[in-house]
Amino acid sequence: MNKVFLIIQREYLTRVKKKSFIIMTLLSPVIFAAMMVVPAWLSSQKDTNEKNIAIEDNSGLYHSAFKSSQYIKYQYLKPESASNKKEIINNKIDALLVINSNLLHNPDDIHLYSDGQVTLDVINHIKQNINSHLRTEKLSSYNIEGLDEKIKEINKVKVKINTIRLDDDGTEKQSSAEFALAIGMISALLIYFIMIIYGTQVMRGVIEEKTNRIVEVIISSVKPFQLMIGKIVGIGLVALTQFFLWIVLTAGVVFFVQLSFSGGTSDKVEITQTVDTPQEVGTQSADQAHEVQKTINKILGILKDANMPLILGLFIFYFIGGYLIYSALFAAIGSAIDNETETQQFVMPVLLPLILSIYVAMAAFRSPHGDISFWFSMFPLTSPVVMMSRIPFDVPLWELLLSMTILTASFIFFTWFAGRVYRTGILMYGKKVSYKEIWKWFIQAGK
């Protein structure tokens, strides 16, 4: 066992000291944080350049329909004055809006002319103004007193369903289908990517040692099976180390980025949202802050009531079980070939169940207790991904135990199979290997 520990130590220290490991460990949290923060930041940015829109209302019906905002200004032209549209659009006028008839009867008879492509903010502001005016005009045509106010009251009625999970002892706990979906998706994708990344690292490591003939020296001191186990466990510890550091560093980066944005841009956001009066802006900001606080409290309550220790424990178990199975298969493939150009014919059949598991996981989000989700969460080559997508939806205990037992037994079997192939293939050079040849090695290794 001391020799196995030495191999594990060598594999672990060799990889964590590499510049690529250090760079990716430090850079990935920044990338992950940017993926979460940058889209939100970009969506909050407004075009602060003032846009001047000229309006030619040939119908004479919409002289009061358009209201200027802080950055979009409207000015009306005399009917038929825009005979030469190109002359109207100049340095002071960015676009010309032409309305020729009653839009209630001809909703397509409105045109916007400009030198270049106008932005979506401008188009949406025009749509908002004209649709609001047409809606008011249509309601007025019904001659029903107070109809507009009644419709506004009706639109305010919105039902929010609070989902409560009842435990076996009758205890009520907050739950959320969206939260369960997010946890399941993140867990499944993490296991999927980590198994591919670090499983292929095991294969490349075996191929490299075999190609450089280093393995011939190592085999003289340790058994091939010990070498394979040491390599698998050592690289697995590297994966766990990097995963733990990613979580800590990503949380830190997101916290400081959110802190800097909340301290530096809140006033700017309020200004860009200004449409009418400062009093209205203050009311909107207070309402938004209240809604945000309610959302945060709800998320914290769900996290408190969710069985996060169980979810994290099962994540670690399925990650280790899935990694050990696939890394054993990748190690067997690496021992059977002499260079990476020959890996395609062997790697793709191994990856197919893993790729399929992602599609099944997507289906499991909609039907976590269906037959397809159940059987694929039992099959050991797909269970690490599929079961993690089901766990947030309260999988029965007997299904969990059965899946874990099958995964454990499968790991033992695949490690045994890979060890037999590895023992023969690691010292085999210059021979074109096929599936039939690998099967022959497996059979002969038992004799």
Image (tube, rainbow, N blue to C red):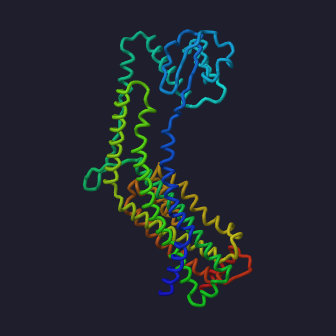
All told, the count of numbered labels is 0
- Residue at image position (42%, 43%) is 264
Residue 81, image x, y percentages: 64, 10
Front in this rendered view, residue 368 or 100: 100
Residue 145, image x, y percentages: 36, 11
Residue 432, image x, y percentages: 74, 76
Image: 45 above or below 235: above
- Which quadrant of the view contains residue 109? top right
Front in this rendered view, residue 385 or 364: 385
- Residue at image position (48%, 24%) is 69
Front in this rendered view, residue 284 or 330: 284
Residue 417, image x, y percentages: 57, 77
Residue found at the very far bottom of the displayed protein: 220
Front in this rendered view, residue 410 or 88: 88
- Which quadrant of the view contains residue 247? bottom left
State left or right for residue 435 relative to residue 107: right
Residue found at the very far front of the displayed protein: 91
Image: 285 above or below 194: above
- Residue at image position (47%, 14%) is 137
Q: Quadrant of the C terminus?
A: bottom right
Image: 412 above or below 295: below
State left or right for residue 389 relative to residue 432: left
Image: 412 above or below 180: below
